Amino acid sequence: MIRIEDVSLSFGGIRAVDGCSFEVAEGSITGLIGPNGAGKSTLFNIVAGLLKPDAGRIVFDGEDITGLPPHTLFHRGLVRTFQIPHEFYRMTVRENLMLVPPEQAGENLFASWFSWGRVKRQDADVLDKVDEVLAFLNLTHVADELAGNLSGGQKKLLDLGRTMMTDARMVLLDEPGAGVNRTLLGAITTAIRRLNEERGYTFCLIEHDMDVIAELCDPVIVMAQGTVLTQGPMSEVRSNPDVREAYLGHAETEDAG
């Protein structure tokens, strides 16, 4: 579904991504792992249109999307989440979800005045979709809670809910398990698997919890120093001596990627 071809990006002479190439197959849950500073999140930002590469290209569903802005990619079904959720913290969970669908008639002043019936029908459809998403993610009990009051795990579930409101085709998940307790982590992994198996979502996810990667992902792609070190099933990746050296030989620094 998505193909990354020889992508590179430098910041001040430092190569954050260096000739990186791999593919994410449609219908897969592909894991992207690597030591801190490997370039993982930087690559996600390039794919999602937040950064423009110095070289290389991104192909999505057969079309070159390199450098297209995030809102254009959003309309094409490519969505990115972040390690730190970006909820509207002063709005309720329900309101956060209601905002997501694009081109709502009620956003147009003329339509809200002269096409009230159409606006009302569309709002009812959006609310039905919100209720479905809340039920799917077991968040109905916090629907009217301010999003800022949610726990870290609940905010990650809300992020997933926002992707569901778009009917996304490809989702880039940046550390969905970061800072999440084990109970809610189980809920998140279950939701990802169900979205993949029941609704055909394709995922590429960055995650440092190797148990989550082993449970969800095939294949697993390992990045180091801005490029792909190896890829394959988790069983092969775990036993690869180059992977162990990349992890154990890296200093524990803030992840630049």
Image: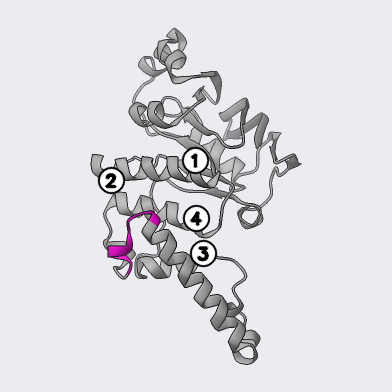
Determine whether, in the image, residue 141 is placed left or right of residue 1: left
**Are the residues flagged by discs 1 and 3 in contact, CB closer than 8 Å?**
no
Number of labelled discs? 4
Disc on the earlier residue, 2 or 4: 4
Instruction: Tell me the element at label 3.
Output: loop
Q: Which mark is residue 197?
A: 1
- Estimate the x, y position of residue 178 in percent, counting from the top left: 33, 40
Q: CA distance from mark 3 to mark 4?
A: 9 Å
Disc on the earlier residue, 1 or 2: 2
**Are the residues flagged by discs 1 and 2 in contact, CB closer than 8 Å?**
no
What is the three-letter code of the residue carrying label 1? Glu
The image quarter in which residue 101 lies: bottom right
Q: Which mark is residue 18?
A: none
Instruction: Tell me the element at label 2.
Output: helix
Magenta run includes residue 138: yes
**Crowding at label 4, few (<14), some or many (≥20) Cα neighbours within 10 Å?**
many
**Residue drawn at the location 68% of the way across and 36% of the way down:** 54
**Crowding at label 2, few (<14), some or many (≥20) Cα neighbours within 10 Å?**
some
Report the magenta residues as a range: 136-143
Q: Which mark is residue 184?
A: 2
Which residue is the extreme one toward the bottom?
114
Q: CA distance from mark 2 to mark 4?
A: 18 Å
Q: CA distance from mark 1 to mark 2?
A: 20 Å
Disc on the earlier residue, 3 or 4: 3
- Estimate the x, y position of residue 44 in percent, counting from the top left: 54, 39
